[in-house]
Image (tube, rainbow, N blue to C red):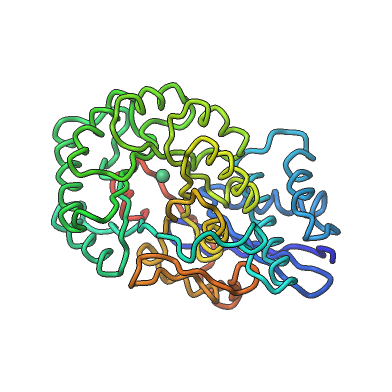
Amino acid sequence: MRITGITTHVVGTPWRNLTYVGVHTDEGLTGVGETRMLGHTDALIGYLNEAAAHHIVGTDPFDTEALVRRMKYGDYGRAGEIVMSGIACVEMACWDIKGKALGVPVWQLLGGKVTDRVKAYANGWYTTERTPEAYHKAARGVMERGYRALKIDPFGTGHFELDAEQSRYAVSLIEAVRDAIGPDAELMLEMHGRFSPSTAVRLAKEMAPFRPAWLEEPVPPENLKALEKVAAKVDMPIATGERIHDRIEFRELFESQAADIIQPDLGHIGGIAETRKLAATAETHYTLIAPHNVGGPVLTAASLQVGFSTPNFKILEHFNDFADAEIKKVVKGAPQVDPETGCFEISYAPGLGVELDIEAAAEFPQQQARFDLWAEGWEKRAPK
Ligand SMILES: [Mg+2]
């Protein structure tokens, strides 16, 4: 089998453009991959057009290892976010083709299942008024939908510091959320790399009574010594990694043991096999994996293939029941969180188990999607 070409479809909403890549073959099989490229969608598509000619067309879609290696190193320059995201889309689509050709789900090709369900946590559920009352109501709604875990960044536009009044307000928001979800649900605390180490440590301690399941990106992502400083001083698991785009660049993070949970994004780190390899390295450091997932149903389905086959997989992020939930209809077979369990139940459908509906996708053309975490009201995900 040979790849004959690729096609791209961008599904736009006000705060995210989702890029779907179809990989087509001379045997009539088509696979699909997806990434959510923040602010660089046109660059991604430009890259993919060049890569199609240089590396992709003519390849056997079963040879993903060689294809990824060629795309990553074959242009000589170091692969950053755009290249690794382009690789991810094509790689995912190739796994989809392999599964369809063999009549098996992708997880079966990754070593088989280790679980029948993957727990989900909700994100994007707080696109409401930023008050304790409104967050209480919204968090109740998440639990009523069946979720047993949710995430929130209560820190407004905090940057390095957060003054006393804003800090108290953030605490009041988390207090309301914990009250709404009860003692057993997991509450992930997101800092989006906002703070200096000392501010992050202070705020983590103020939030500790509400028992966050993890503290995410307490400091900006580049300086691991700063993260180590936070990890040494707080008494909660540290999660990070959504802005690392190459599994080899996780090495120093593992060596530091500063992270308890890593959060690679399958759509930014080269796809399914790169993430599975990274998870194996994480396992040697007794570290869990909880992929970052701001994608639509295809990226979710790809992330789940790793989830069903990886022993140290903790939980998967999910936006698509809350923020712009209508985009789920662009894909047939979109993964669903079971309201009885708060989990994604295993799927036996071949490949990724999803199909892009090109006509439905056309209802959501690419937008000037903007998501600025330092703009007032960012959490509403409705940029002006
Ligand atoms: Mg994050």
Name the foreground residue: 163 vs 29.
29
Name the foreground residue: 2 vs 213.
213
- Residue ID at (31%, 45%): 213
Q: Quadrant of residue 184?
A: bottom left
Q: Position of residue 56 (x, y in %)?
A: 79, 55
On screen, 31 above or below 28?
above
- Residue ID at (69%, 33%): 78
Q: Is residue 84 left or right of residue 132?
A: right
Q: Is residue 208 left or right of residue 300?
A: left
Q: Position of residue 195 (x, y in %)?
A: 33, 30
Q: Is residue 189 left or right of residue 283?
A: left
| Quarter of the image where the N terminus is located | bottom right
- Residue ID at (15%, 54%): 179
Q: Position of residue 35 (x, y in %)?
A: 57, 55
- Residue ID at (39%, 35%): 193
On screen, 232 above or below 350?
above
Q: Is residue 84 left or right of residue 133?
A: right
